[in-house]
Image (cartoon, rainbow, N blue to C red):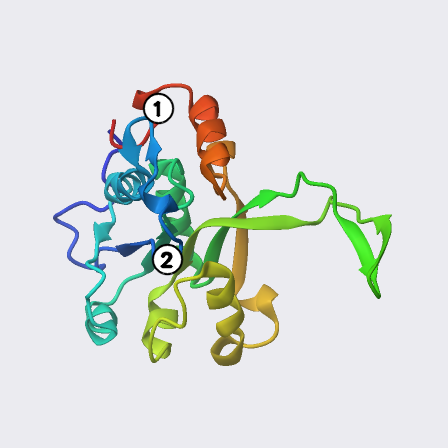
Amino acid sequence: MTPDPYDVHDDDEPRPRGRVLDEDRGALPYALLHGEALVVCAAWAVGEAGVRLLDHGTPWSEVQEEGGPLLLHDSLCPATPAEFLADCVARATATGRVVVGVRPVTDTVKQVSDGVVGGTVDREGLRVLCSPVVLPAEVVRRLPDLPSTDLATLLDALVLPLGQDRSAWLELVEAPAEARRVRDLDDVRLLEQLTGRPDALPGS
């Protein structure tokens, strides 16, 4: 089990809170990975990262009042290691920037103009959003509510309160391979092969 990085005797800093996002994702968060629902695997990882899991019904005003960073973990990235989640929380706390887990783009990307497929786009600088998104305490305080439970939409919504220059408030962190996002049941089976065994999952 991952050691809790937030000692119970440390009263100076509020304990980070977290939510596992399963809204508007259909039935896929409840598919089984090594015998456990994806949403359960994601919740285990949040707990092992030393983050207190919030109920879906927790009012936003209560989240703001407690202070501390807020980790948003996508249930469709169920095998994300707890150590990576904890690192993202620590980065957001230290820098005050929104921290986002990303993966390199591996698919071929083509240019399209007026419906005509053109040349291949260089993938070197491209990244695909996975999980988590960590909102530092100051960002949580400034938001009137959580703009969206879709992480890409959420990041777009943060531009209005935080500014067009994303480099000033956003940090992208490359996530490990097992943190990849699943899009369907075939992806779940591939993730099972990648993680290798049930005890490789957080909480096992």
Instruction: Check if mark 1's residue and mark 2's residue have beta carbons within 8 Å.
Output: no
Query: Residue 118's spot in the image, x, y percent?
Result: 87, 53
Q: Which residue was labeled with disc 1? A: 200
Q: Nearer the viewer, residue 41 or 70?
A: 41
Q: Secondary structure at mark 2?
A: helix
Quadrant occupied by the N terminus = top left
Indicate the quadrant containing the C terminus: top left, top right, bottom left or bottom right: top left
x, y percentage for residue 120? 83, 46
| Camera-side residue of 64 and 146 | 146
Question: Which residue position holds label 2?
Answer: 93
Q: Position of residue 164 (x, y in %)?
A: 60, 75
Residue 158 visible in the snapshot: no
Q: Which mark is residue 5?
A: none
Nearest the eye: 17 or 120: 120
Q: Is residue 154 depicted above or below 21 in this figure? A: below
Q: Left or right: 21 with respect to 4?
A: right
Q: Residue at x 19, y 59 (%)?
A: 55
**Circle 1: element type:** helix
Left or right: where does residue 131 sit relative to residue 115?
A: left
